Amino acid sequence: MPLWQLSGRNRLSRPVKVAAPGSNPAGTRQNQGGNVKVAVLAEAHPDERRVALVPASLKELLKAGAEVTVQSGAGAPASISDSEYQEAGATIAPDAASTLEGASVLLGVQPRPEGSGPGDLGGLPKGTVVVSFMDPLGSPERAKAMADAGLSAFAMELIPRTTRAQRMDALSSQATVAGYKAVLMAADHLPKLMPMFMTAAGTIRPSKALILGAGVAGLQAIATARRLGAKVEAFDVRPAVKEQVQSLGASFLETEEDVTAEGEGGYAKELSEEQHRKELELIAAHIHDADIVITTAQIPGRPAPVLITEEMVKSMHPGSVIIDMAAISGGNCELSQAGQTVERHGVTIMGPDNLPSTIPVHASQMYGKNVVTFLLEMVQDGELVVDLENDVVGPACLSHGGEVWNPRVRDTLGLPPLPAPAEAPEPAPAPAEPGE
Ligand SMILES: NC(=O)c1ccc[n+]([C@@H]2O[C@H](COP(=O)([O-])OP(=O)(O)OC[C@H]3O[C@@H](n4cnc5c(N)ncnc54)[C@H](O)[C@@H]3O)[C@@H](O)[C@H]2O)c1
């Protein structure tokens, strides 16, 4: 999963309150019999061990007047039994189809691939609110399919990185888990100890870690490598992180000439060719000494920058380990392969594609909190209210009312911008009730 955020203000996060399809077209409430009926399915992706809702967060939904149905076994990969969900107040349904019966909301971790059975795009009634990661820029055609299916889709990647939305920021919560796990993987594959040991059998020098990209995952990787006793160096093109890196006990690498690229919303932007060359020189001067390298560098909506060349890998000691956390969005190391572990020039290069799933208990606990906090933004007095004026709901909206809603995704799909509020079309008419 790429860890990026779409930048730019949603042009439709303007004062427009739109009724969800399936509701009274003149109103603003998606009232499904006064209840919010939430469905949680077992994740469709075979390697996904997280679950979108854990019992503790489920209780918050119930307090808000929601009903929750969980597919039997959905929590098992995250060590949550059906009976724990039941004790928390959920109904357990035997299969996906019965879990979805009457549901107004589907919560997930990953988007459900088409053809994966009930819960995929074709299987959900119009107006269903779907909340999960959706890879909106990587798979914009999914947004189009969801709009065509009349779904109100909300992408966890699109939740704004604001102070108010911190409790809903699943990119951050999952990056925290991933940054931690990357260091454990590196330590596990390293033929060395991480901390310094002073023993009767001699002194063991601490291992050296180099962390490239000090965003959420990188800072957690620094903290974890420090806890394991490594000597840590780090670099990021955003100078603002220097203090954070140092406060974790790591050294921040600096160039004589400026190599910074701070973009919109505090995110990185692409370096100029000249600056990129200088950055590579800086990394080359430090990487040959590093036992482990963790790379996390990403540019929102762009392929990940190449920071480690083959020449650099050749310069490293045999047995060193590179964990390329950006492998899935192109890779920070030119030799890494997404989802694979390869050995090149004696160096182990890993390109994990879903680290949070490898720590499913706590990754689900954090994700569940994020997703429920977000959903509660759309619950008022026990009713589902899709209010696109809301400063979190609006920007997170991917499709609604039969339209792709996010301006950058529209642009990627070659769709024209949506009309200004005054010209906005009436919401789609309510579909027939089941059985009508
Ligand atoms: N609630 C909040 O206010 C909040 C929460 C989380 C994150 N944020 C902000 O989000 C941003 C980071 O988030 P993220 O971790 O998802 O980022 P990210 O995953 O998009 O990128 C990871 C890191 O890679 C860095 N990077 C990009 N190109 C690089 C290069 N060529 N060389 C070295 N490093 C490079 C980026 O600066 C970033 O720190 C920061 O601006 C952070 O302050 C804000």
Image (cartoon, rainbow, N blue to C red):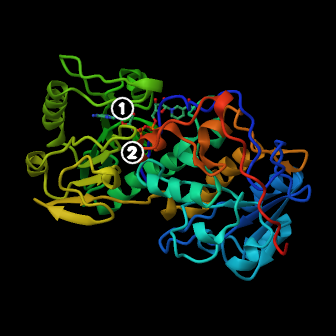
**Residue in the picture at 29% in, 66% down:** 340
The three-letter code of the residue at mark 1 reads Ala
The extreme top residue here reads: 257
Looking at the picture, does residue 407 appear above or below residue 256? Answer: below
Q: Is residue 120 visible?
A: no
Q: Is mark 2 within 8 Å of ligand 1?
A: no
Q: Which mark is residue 225?
A: 2
Query: Is 288 left or right of 83, judged from the image as shown?
Result: left
Q: Position of residue 75 (x, y in %)?
A: 66, 71
**Residue in the picture at 86% in, 50% down:** 383
Secondary structure of the residue carrying tag 2 is helix
Q: Quadrant of ligand 1?
A: top left
Please identify the quadrant where the N terminus is shown: bottom left
Q: Position of residue 16 (x, y in %)?
A: 71, 32
The extreme bottom residue here reads: 94
Label pair 2/1, CB-CB below 8 angstroms:
yes
**Residue in the picture at 81% in, 71% down:** 434
Disc 1 marks which residue?
250
Q: Is mark 1 within 8 Å of ligand 1?
A: no
